[in-house]
Amino acid sequence: LRMVEPVGVQIEHVKMLPKTQKNTSCFLICGIPEDAEKLIRMLDGQMMFGRPVSVSYPTPPKRTRDSGDVDERLDSALEIRGFPAECSAADISAAIEAGGREVVTVKILRHSLMTSIIALVYMKSPEDAQAVIEELDGFEMAPGYMLKVLLKSQVPNEDDREPRPPQGGGADEGRPSWARQVLHGGGGGGGDGNMDVKERVRQAIAAVDAAKTFRPGPAMALEEQRS
């Protein structure tokens, strides 16, 4: 609690998880969703006690079938690489949900360790996950930031992969108008290339009446990673 007091949010409950050899983790329950989002934005990737801290929304629980416990999450889980490092989980959720897809939660991996981030995105359904792959895989988010979208179950066993370099011409071809708005700031890809990524997302959301910033609830996870 001393670690989050300077942020100025209300914490209703703290649950410590068993320590491991690599890290110490806990769950924090905030009074309102906005406080959880504020904690993530201000603390994720910061150095505390000589170690980087990872703060994110928790992953959804495993669903079950009549035949027994079955982990179905990978059917709807996406790994998205290429978003600039300044993007938050809320930014990524907003960009995806602007197209009418429903996001359950977003987990940012390796924050502050790469020029771009890796986002683990849990969609509401496998159909939504497949639609996001078709619409955003290979899309140039910003100069030098090419999105790579895969089902989590199909991600190759590689480490520290950088996003593919931008390819000239035709990046918007075949993309729906909402994708051009969200990722280029409106006008079908003719937006200001120097505009802040978050501002482009905010402008796109304002232009789409049905789009709302993702607010997954007051629960969040905080993990202190040991180097």
Image (cartoon, rainbow, N blue to C red):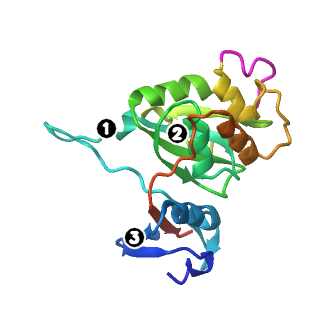
Q: Of callouts 1 and 2, which one flags the residue occurring earlier in the amino acid sequence?
A: 1
Mark 2: amino acid: Glu
Horizontal side of residue 9 vs 144, given as left or right: left
User: In the figure, 57 relative to 2: above or below?
Assistant: above
* Span shown in magenta: 165-174
Find out whether the residues at labels 3 and 1 contact each other: C-beta distance under 8 Å.
no
User: In the figure, 84 relative to 48: above or below?
Assistant: above
Find the distance from the CA under tag 3 to the CA under tag 1.
26 Å
Q: Secondary structure at mark 3?
A: loop
Horizontal side of residue 111 vs 23, given as left or right: right
Numbered mark located on residue 79 in the image:
2
Numbered mark located on residue 118 in the image:
none
Mark 1: amino acid: Glu
In percent of width and height, residue 144 lies at 78, 37
Of labels 3 and 1, the one closer to you: 1
Q: Which residue is mark 1?
A: 72
